[in-house]
Image (cartoon, rainbow, N blue to C red):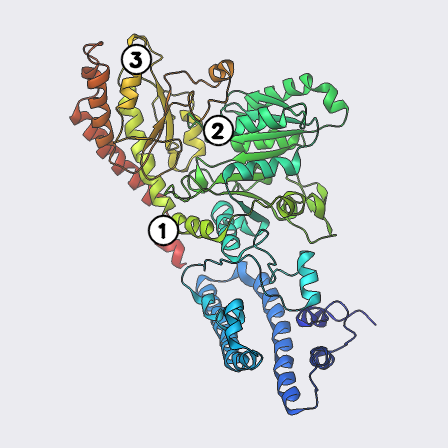
Amino acid sequence: MNDPTPDLAFVRELSPRRNTTAARDVDGLVEEQLRHFGIDPSGDYGRRLGALASQLYGAQAAAHELWAVTVRELASLEPRDRVARFNAKRFLCFQLAKILDTLQNPLRKSYQSLLDAPAQSAVKGPYPLLDNVTALFSATPVITRTATYVYACTEWVEDAFNGREPLHEIYSRLLNPTSISLANHIVDLEAGPLAGEYLAWNFNSGMAAIDATLANLVGYQDVVLASRNVYGGTYQLLHDWYGKQSNLDVAVRWFDGFTAESFAAALVETRRACADRLAAGRHVYVFLESPCNPHGYVLDVPGICRVAHEAGLTVICDATVGTPILQPVLQRADPMERPDFVIHSYTKDLAGSGTTTAGVCIGRNERMFLPKGDTVTAPGPDGRPRTHRWDESLFWNVYYVKGAFLDADKAFEVINGMRTVELRILNKCINTVVLARALARHPAFHVCCSAVDGNENSALAARQMFLGLPAPLFTVDLQTPLGSQVRREAFQRFFDSLEPAFGLQVTLGQVNTVVLCPALTSHSELSEGALREAGISRTTIRISVGEEDPRTLLAHLMRAAEIAIEPECPGFLARFPAPEEIDRLYEETYVDVHRRYARSRPRMSSRSG
């Protein structure tokens, strides 16, 4: 058989014998299909069924042609033409669904005629093809609660297991429509205009996403160079599992500072310290967390990525605290300045409500998925070609075999939570500025927050973060001359009195403001030495800022100080800013941030031009 024409190559995707067909044209495909299912093409039913099938094959060819025109012309279209084409194509989806709906009643009658004992149909439940079409037009993604799926035919499901038929999701441990909807959504949010270059896989937690990404990349006796301030669970995973000699014996190195220069110096030292491993062919991988936990400090992610990519290294960035709103690390114009993989814990600000745990890894298409058996050559961040094998992709190497896929109910919760993330983050950042600056005016408190004037991270945060806003996460401690006068027992009474205004909870990124002592909770896996190096003391309090009025929080904090600290440190309460000063700080911050936010939005002239 000669190679099919391009049109027939697209058309035969609809054939039940797509991989073994001998047909050379649409008529041949139609006849082959009818005979495959035992239908006489010459009978009245066969002629009607064949006529419909023939039109569907034609529609498939036209759909591919429309796809090609869309890709070719979209970038050059005027806004009015984009609107017109979107709605015209959208209506085609309803037309196709109407055809399916028209097929349903006779299909239902045929199904009913096959039930010898109708009572036994209770075992099967409703036949899914009969009632699911209208779910396509649900205003929110449907929660697809199923373990498995009905498939079309042998060759289609074989293609599905080879990653070549996305219509068949096979099994919900691998793919599920609700979770895929969320994955597409987070790519749009994180990558923006570059979304077509990226793909995401969802996991049951942020830690599962981190582990999957590391498992896909890091091999025996490789090296991980990580930023110092990472979530305690990440530290434990790297130090206690990947670094364990009986596991992968990975050399885990830590770098301090926030700049590309500090990273470059650490990379030189890492190469010196790990020279034997590198000489044996092992690799260095870079793990960043920005903004970091617990201090909320920002790293120069673009600058560090550039240095790493110039050295041929792969960069992973946990961007949970910043979210794509505050620090969209994948929207840099220069690929050298983008991480190779981006992690988010949906559990935090993206979902926002604290009712579910979930995570995601985002990476370039060729590193996330290729059909089974395929190899593709694509440019790396530096523009040089790199060959990628299907079994090196995160999907086949880890995701397909480990089974940490996010279920539909959790995905639905995250999708709903993400609807309000931008305004929630904006409000939290305003509250962070007020809380951090008010506390910094008390001489007993040492505040680690980029919103505080003169803070070592302020200039970098002003350049890297949206509107120069701080992450809604920072720390305070009593490592000051006045604070050192507060005995540990008094500090404990003070902390324990912060409820109910501050939630004593081990999490971050919730609607409410929550506090914890990292040394005792989120970072308790770190040794005393590691805690010191991370800038965490026994009196460090991490504040994950919520959406409450910050003045209410400050008033409660003052009452807690009056109960627990004032009796043994007279005058402590009087050192807080006056209520009028806090009111003025709140009003000025609120107006300033909202004014700058409004000015950052595209103007009407650019929207209608």
Q: Looking at the image, which is closer to me, 586 or 484? A: 484
What residue is rendered at 58% in x and 24% in y? 240
Would you name the residue on which mark 3 appears? 489
- Corner quadrant of residue 361: top right
Q: Mark 3 belongs to which amino acid?
A: Glu
Q: Is residue 444 visible?
A: no
- Corner quadrant of residue 243: top right
Q: Earlier in the sequence, mark 2 or mark 3?
A: 2
Q: Is residue 330 above or below residue 258?
A: below
Image coordinates of residue 221 in percent, x first then y, are 70, 26
Q: Residue furthest left?
A: 580
Q: Earlier in the sequence, mark 1 or mark 2?
A: 2
Would you name the residue on which mark 2 appears? 231
Q: Mark 1 belongs to which amino acid?
A: Arg
For label 3, the SS is helix
Disc number lying in front (1 or 2):
2
Quadrant (top left, top right, bottom left, bottom right) of the N terminus: bottom right
For label 2, the SS is loop
Q: Is residue 238 visible?
A: yes
Image coordinates of residue 44 in percent, x first then y, are 64, 91
Q: Looking at the image, which is closer to me, 311 or 253? A: 253
For label 1, the SS is loop
Residue 603 shows which numbered tag?
1
Image coordinates of residue 567 in percent, x first then y, are 19, 11
